[in-house]
Image: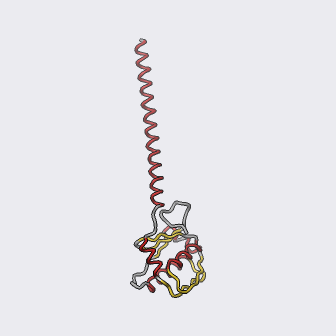
Amino acid sequence: MKRLVMMMAALFFAGSLMAATQVDTTKNNKDQKKDQKKEQKKEEKKIVNDPEMVKKLETITVPKVDFQKISISTAVKQLNELAMLNDSEKKGVIFSLDADDQMAASASIITFSKEKVNLETILKAVCQQAGYTYLATPDGVKLSKPDNGKKKGAEKL
């Protein structure tokens, strides 16, 4: 009988250890997933502007720009036009607003006037006044409203 009680106790102890190990393994899996998400976010933040697109923004010079109390969505449309008109290759640059920011775009008012200015300077002024960031990719430039690190890859100005 004593042996039976000892075996039962040993089995119970072994079972509880296995259960504890299983719970610990589940917790470790959750921790690993959290760590992976953190690493992924760090990688996303490392996204930088495409050097060729930045060079294009620097080299396209606009003879005169005059934004007088316009919304950022209007400024983006005009940036597209200015890029096409003043690009020596006549390809222009595609500027766009992040889809999540389309509704808030009318709340930002831009005023900027200058002669003989490159697209990069205009873009930085527009983003600064509107509280936006931008990301230059090989396909174009996307403007977005920063939201405390939730957005991916936008360069803070």
- Quadrant location of the C terminus in the rendered image: bottom right
Color theme of the render: secondary structure
User: On the picture, is 111 further left or further right than 14?
Assistant: right
- Viewer-proximal residue, 52 or 153? 52
- Give the tally of numbered discs: 0
Is 75 in front, or is 101?
Answer: 75
Q: Is residue 149 above or below residue 23?
A: below
The image shows residue 121 at horizontal and vertical percentages of: 53, 78
- The quadrant in which residue 25 appears is top left
Residue 146 location, x and y as percent?
Answer: 54, 65
Q: Is residue 91 left or right of residue 98?
A: left
Residue 26 falls in image quadrant = top left
Residue 16 in percent (x, y) is at: 45, 28
Q: Is the N terminus in the top left, top right, bottom left or bottom right quadrant? A: top left
Identify which residue is drawn at 48% across, 62% down.
152
The vertical placement of 63 against 134, above or below, is below
Who's the residue at 48% across and 84% down the image? 61
Residue located farthest toward the bottom when viewing the structure as drawn: 63
- List x then y, in percent, for residue 115: 55, 86
- Residue nearest the observer in this picture, 83 or 3: 83
Q: Residue furthest top?
A: 1
Residue ID at (45%, 58%):
43
